[in-house]
Image (cartoon, rainbow, N blue to C red):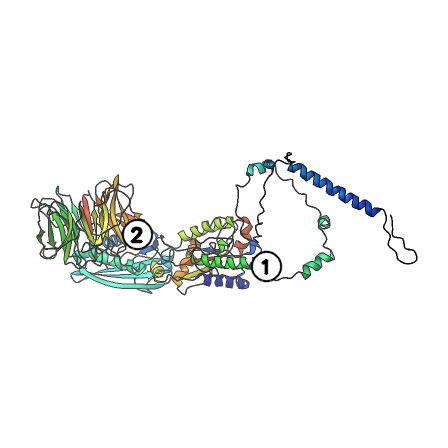
Amino acid sequence: MHSRIDRRRLLGGMLAGTAALALPRSGRAQDQTILLSIGSPGGNKTPLAVARPIGGASESAEFYEVVRRDLELSGWFRMIEEAAHIEPGGTGVKPGEFAFEDWDVPGAVGLGKIVLQPDGKGLRAEAWVYDVGGRRKLGAKAFTADASAWRSLAHKVAGEIVLRITGRPAPFASRFACAGSFSGNKEIYVVDFDGYGLTRITKNGSINLAPTWDPTGTRLAFTSYAAGNPDLYVADLSGGRITRLSARTGINSGAAWSPLGDRIALTMAPNGDPDVYTIDAKNGAVSTRVTKAAGIDSSPCWSPDGSKVAFVSERGGGAQIYVASADGSGARRVTFQGGHNVDPSWSPKGDRLAFVSRDGVFDVFTVRLDGTGLTRLTQGQGDNEDPSWSPDGEYVAFSSTRSGSSHIWMSTADGTHQVQLTTGKGGYTNPSWSPALTW
Amino acid sequence: MASIAVQGRKKERITWEVPASVALHVLLALLIFLAQCGSCAGEPPLVNPDNVMRVSAVALPKQTGRLPDKPSRTPDNPVAAKEAPPEPVAEAPKGQADAAKPVPNASDMSLQKDEPRKGTTKDRTDAREALLNSARREALVKDPNAPLGDTDRPRTSPDGVSIDEAIFGPGGDGINDPELARWKVQAEEALRANWTPLPATVAGHPDYVVYLVVPVGPDGKLGKPQVYKGTGDSGFDRSAIMAVMKTGRVPPPPEKWRGSTTKGVVMEFPAGAKR
């Protein structure tokens, strides 16, 4: 950050250098130099142009639409309409093969150029990213995939454009696990970031709820009534096998994987009083009883370093969010406003908790761990529940009924940019955002 | 008047005035004695003590020099002042005004000249006040909520940097004109809305600042920007120029500042931190 003293000297220098710049010396009011400080450009979306892919692949048109939609969903950009592009179609993507001036005209600050071409039985995509104002290449990268995985390839290309222009990774290659009521029952599904590629995980005709990803993105824990009792199951996505991990009397729900993936925190009530426990992720043996207070304790989630657990407790009267060490010691209350605060989700950055508060309807908030900095993400737009952070901590996903039926929505962490991710007739609940995936 | 006659050699002679004076003194003493004897005999006093106001002697407050004035009572109702506006003072011609001033005489001037400069009460108060103000400024730098005293608050940075660094104050250029300040806010907002530097540059180089000099016409039209100090990153510098060109026009500057804005306004574009 520049220092103010430097600015003062600079302005002094400007005053001294008035002869060259025809600037007035200070004297009468009308002759004083006026300084406008434009401030941080935060909040302005970057004008971005992405040219249609060259290379001749048959999937080019759909591929291009997926890339554009990803970039729009990110909230970083103001996409320049294709109609405003003056560069002829098919122009090259490498430096020297096109003119930056062609992209000045539509006002592009960033430029993405794509090559998509057949590569044996698969596809090869290249992403070339440029700084139009600086007349320089920001980066280029190539990806290959099976032809059937062209959507994943498009997400990779879009992510590369975001990374080069913003300096931050994009969550396009991640997925959501959710409970979906599309077939009359509630089953567990996995869906791509942009709402496509819906894949059913369970097919037991029962009620299946609250899926959560393990840190590797290859297993899902969820609660199912398939055996009559709300038991905890784990689905191995790589092997396609589902095993029951905890079937203790009473509830076995609200599972959350530890950051190392070796333990699962969940709510159980073996003696009738729901409390938070941790169990071994391999055999389901109880590791720790985290809460022992009278009243309901539920909905645990882990801190990113695994040292703490946040949970909901009614020990103070209404449902409020508490944080304690993973062994249950040092519990302290985090939320104080509102009488019903539930569903905590710990930011991957470790600094905030997202949660749901009921004030007539359900809305999503975030708060610092010391209880300060309460930020409302949703208001007056249906019920908004089940917050889940993106792997990079830049976004919060949640289920919302604002468009009628329940869909997965995404908001930037400050709530300024909110978009609907899933489409169709709806029925998506309990979204859980995966870690960055390689599959 | 009787006098002592001197004839031949010096000789003092007692005249009739001496016995007369003695007799008068004796008569006066007798009268006083008789009056005192009368009051002792239970006659009513001349003044009823119940009606006497008792006055205690107290030390006068010391002169406090230039300590800040604090309101000790509710200010006068401004409406009353409206009802009785002060008589407009007719401005006297220069010569008459000068004539009305008291002309200092030579003795006044010599007094001012010869008055000792050190050690007076006023100087001691000034020195004390200067010391106090210095301490207050130091306290303000450490704690923005410290008691203000008569410290020049606008010159003190709200974020606790030194006063020297905060010399420009909130306006940035030391100009304190509310009308100008309002225009600056509007113009800055218009320019900020059109400033879209590359986010990666902003995130990677939060220390980048580009300064432009831009003439602003009386109607608010922005002239051709000149880079006064760039960053060396042509893309970032260009983003500031593009912001000016895209904005095109800002609200018309205040009339009394148009002479200055037409010659050129300095625009500062700091990268800062985005999102």
Disc sitting over residue A327 in the figure: none
Residue A75: assigned label: 2
In this view, the mark in front (2 or 1): 1
Q: Check the image and name the residue furthest to the left.
A: A227
* Label pair 2/1, CB-CB below 8 angstroms: no
- In the rendered view, does B169 fall on the left or right side of B39? left
Along the line of sight, which residue is nearer the eye, A19 or B246?
A: A19
Task: Pick out the residue farthest to the top.
Answer: B44
Residue A58 visible, this angle = no
Name the kind of residue labelled 1 in the image: Asp
How many circles with numbers are drawn on the protein? Answer: 2
Q: Which residue is mark 1?
A: B123
User: Percent x, y for residue B100?
Assistant: 72, 48
Instruction: Name the foreground residue: A390 vs A253.
Output: A253
Q: CA distance from mark 2 to mark 1?
A: 66 Å
Name the residue located 44 percent from the left edge and 52 percent from the top edge. B188
Mark 1, secondary structure of its residue: helix
